Structure formats: structure tokens, C-alpha cells
Image (cartoon, helix red, strand yellow):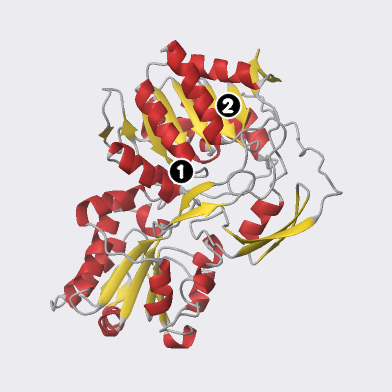
Amino acid sequence: MPTFKGILVKVSKTEKKVLNVWELFEKEYNVKLYTEDFASENINAKAETKVIKNVVCSFCGCLCDDLEVEVSGNRILKVKKACVLGMSKIIHSNKNRILHPYIRVNGRLEKTDLETAIKKAAKILAESKFPLLYGWSNTTVEAIRLGAELAEYLGGVFDNTSVVCHGPTVLGVQEAGYVTATLGQIRNYADLMIYWGCNPLHAHPRHANRYSALAKGVFVKSRKERKIVVIDVKETDSVKLADLFIKVEPGRDYELISALRALIKGYDVEFDEVAGVDIETIRKLVEMMITAKFGVIFYGLGLTMSIGKGRNIEEIIRLAQDLNEWTKFVALPMRGHYNVVGANQVSTWSTGYAFAVDFRRKYPRHNPGVTSATDLLNEGNVDAALIVASDPVAHFPAKAVENLLKIPVITLDPKWNLTAAISTVVIPVAMAGVEVEGTAYRMDKVPLRVKKLVEPPNGVLSDEEVLKLLLEEIKKLV
């Protein structure tokens, strides 16, 4: 898994024109991107207006389930109770849409029909010796199940976006187990909340109000009855919530966690500071931890994607286990995409492994750093790719993207993005949680049902339906 944090860079002033992402991609990779702007189809303005309540937001891992969406005909008019991120996704669901299947002909994407696109995609995957099936975190459990079946049938690799976010969380759990709780339990009982390496006010805007710092619980009724600690390498907006802010030096979280564990176990720490934090502040945090009635550590990419990775998470979990000798304490990852937990869950119950699953030998193998999508693409080991509900071209390391450009790519997505723009086959799909219902898992592993609010564009199927057609066609060829 690539390390995106702690990389030394040199910043210098330039007089050169600042290119947008499309211009930069064309200049660096000599690929003419498909940038035609698409608008959603016309809607029926005569229909009656209705309000759909208890809508589950399909943006982040919070899966807030109290939204109210006002719909007229096939148009979303208002979204109430959502954060700005969830509201933007739902109310602008018709923007930048892919409305037709495309196949690349002579370097340019040309419109085609769904049957032709399915046959072309099936032929590419059937003829591939080692395909990569990647993404899955922004679609439903029902679609992910078919993806796992397809990967096994093809003898390819089944991987999801946790490879570049919370994959190390999975590795830590494999070593240390889980000490966890639901967000409902945390909201009602927790009187000490620690945010470590995460910035919920930006990444999960409603987390504090619904589930943690500012939530109105049954037994812990308000912010006044809680203590909040933020641990990070710099001051973020989430520090505004904190009773105590601890600034840890980059890449030294493991040392700080180890010092906390030592003090909790009754050992002395013979240093004036650890990881840039003075020993008295560390002792103060230990006292807050052991005197809490119910404590929780919410940890984010500051731990999973910095030096230590999976070992950081293993140590955080063991810290929570140590604290349970004193009081009730849990640790919970701040998961990003709304169904990345679902992708891990489906992969685990289908294959035994949460991500980076290799079916080359016709049985599942798991070796992160070798069988993960980023590493396979960095080494140029795969000869075709099916990308579902993700945009690796925008987010993967440059070497991985360069190798992705050398192989046929099939993209299933509701909207245009960089990966769709460079693909060999593009198949539009309905937007889960807006145009199609299905199951998703919240960050605490609670499954929820996302609702269908409006109809998808004419002729556009769900991920699940497209994958069924693709699997049926491949079985005719292989």
C-alpha cells in the first residue's frame, strides 16, 4: 500500500501557467481526455411534490438516516438535515452524468448501445489472463457480491478502496482483534472521546452532532458532560471541539501510543517528552482515560496512512484493550466512502479476506503489498481492469496510472471522471441511494437500507443489473 503522508516535497515559485487536471493529464500522459459536458434528461415538472423521510445519506461512512428529501416528478428539489457534502451529492445527482454506453474507437469514445458495450467488456475480461476488479466502496452490497463472484470466475484480483485508506485498519484487526461499539452506544454512554489522526468537522461534518461530541445521548446528555481530546500533527478545525489538544510529531504516533500503554500498565517513562509531547501532558491524558466511565478513540488516516500503518492500528486496539482493565473503552475507525465497510464485509464473508484478494490459483489468497491494486498496477502485473464506483486515475500513484493507461479499462460509474475518460468501455449506471435502493454498512458495521428517491435516466441500469449481464455474457465465453 502506498504511503501518501510524510513525503518530503520542495515547493518553489513558478511563472508557468497552472494547468487544470484535464490539461495536466493530457500534457503528462499524452492522452486526449473525453470532456464533453452532459446534462441530465428532462424531468416531468407536472408531477405532485412529495417529501421522503428517513432517507439514508449515501456520501460518507456516517450514513445519516434522518434526511428529508423533497421530490417533484423526477426532480430533487430540497434536501433537509444533510451536511453540505451529502446535500451536494443528492441535489446535484443529475450533474455531469454519463447517459449512454461508450466504446473507444480510434482513440475516441463513441456512443454505442448497452448490449454492444456489455459484449465488448465481457470479451476484454474473458480474454484477460489476470484482470483487476477494483472500487466497490460507492455501490451497494448487492452489487459487491456479484463483483466477488465475477473476480473468482475470472481468476482475477478483487480489491476495494480501503487499500488506500483503512486497509491498515484491517491488518491491525487481524493481529489484535476488535474492541468496538455501535455509534448509538457511543452517543448514549461515552463521556470521553478522542479523535486521533482525523478531522471529523471536515470529513464527516455531522459526526459530532449525531454520534459523538455534540450529540444528545440518553445517559450523557450534552457536550458539557463529555471530555474531548484531539491528537493530530497540526491544529485542525476539530480542535475547536477539544478540551485537550495534543500535537504529535509526524510519523511518531506509535511511540506516543506505546508511552500511553506503558503508563496505564504502571511502568515509568524515563523521558521528558515522547513524540514531541511532554510527559506531563501524556500523564494528564492517561488520567482522563482511566477515570472515564466510557471512552472511545476515533482514528483516521493520520494513523492508517502514516509511518507504522497497520502496526499503529494494532497498538491503538491494544491500548483500548489495556484500558478495559480500568473502564469501558472502544476504538472505531472513521471510514470514508459510504459503503467501504460494506465492501470489506462482503469481501470477508465471500473470500475470507477484506481486500486485495487474488484468485489466480482459483482459490482466494491475500498478500497486501503484492496482491493489492496499487502494487499490481505499479508493477504492471494486470492486463485488464474493471473499475466500479471509483476513480483510481485521480487518486493512485503516477506509476500505477501510467500502467493503467496501457491496458483495457472498463468503467461502471454514474458520472464522468478521469478514469471513465481514459477507459476502453464506459457503461453508465444508476446512482445508489438516489436512483436505486440497496444495502450499505455504516462505519460501525451496522447495515442500513439506502432508498430510491427518483428514477435513473432512460436506459441506465443499476450496478447490480449491469454486473449480472456482464457475468452472464462472460460465462458464455469462458
Q: Where is residue 187 in the image (x, y as percent from the top left)?
A: 43, 74
Q: Residues within 10 Å of mark 1 (few under 14, many from 20)?
A: many
Q: What element carries label 1?
A: helix
The image quadrant that residue 251 belongs to is bottom left
Residue depicted at x 17% and y 72%: 262
Three-letter code for the amino acid on which mark 2 is drawn: Tyr
Whole-percent x, y for residue 363 in the image: 26, 27
Query: Which of 36/270 is in front?
Result: 36
Quadrant where the N terminus sits is: top left
Q: Name the residue under label 1.
A: 141
**Residue visible at 65% across and 36% down in the picture:** 416
Q: Closer to the camera, 226 or 24?
A: 226
Answer whether residue 381 is visible to the viewer in this image: no
Pinpoint residue 61: horizontal percent, then vertical percent: 48, 56
The residue that appears at 83% across and 44% down in the rendered structure is 44
Which one is in front, 391 or 68?
A: 68
Q: Gap between marks 1 and 2, in whole Å?
A: 35 Å
**Horizontal arrangement in the rendering, residue 45 relative to residue 385 (left or right):** right
Labels in figure, total: 2
How far across and how far down the image is residue 103, in percent? 63, 19
Mark closer to the chain start, 1 or 2: 2
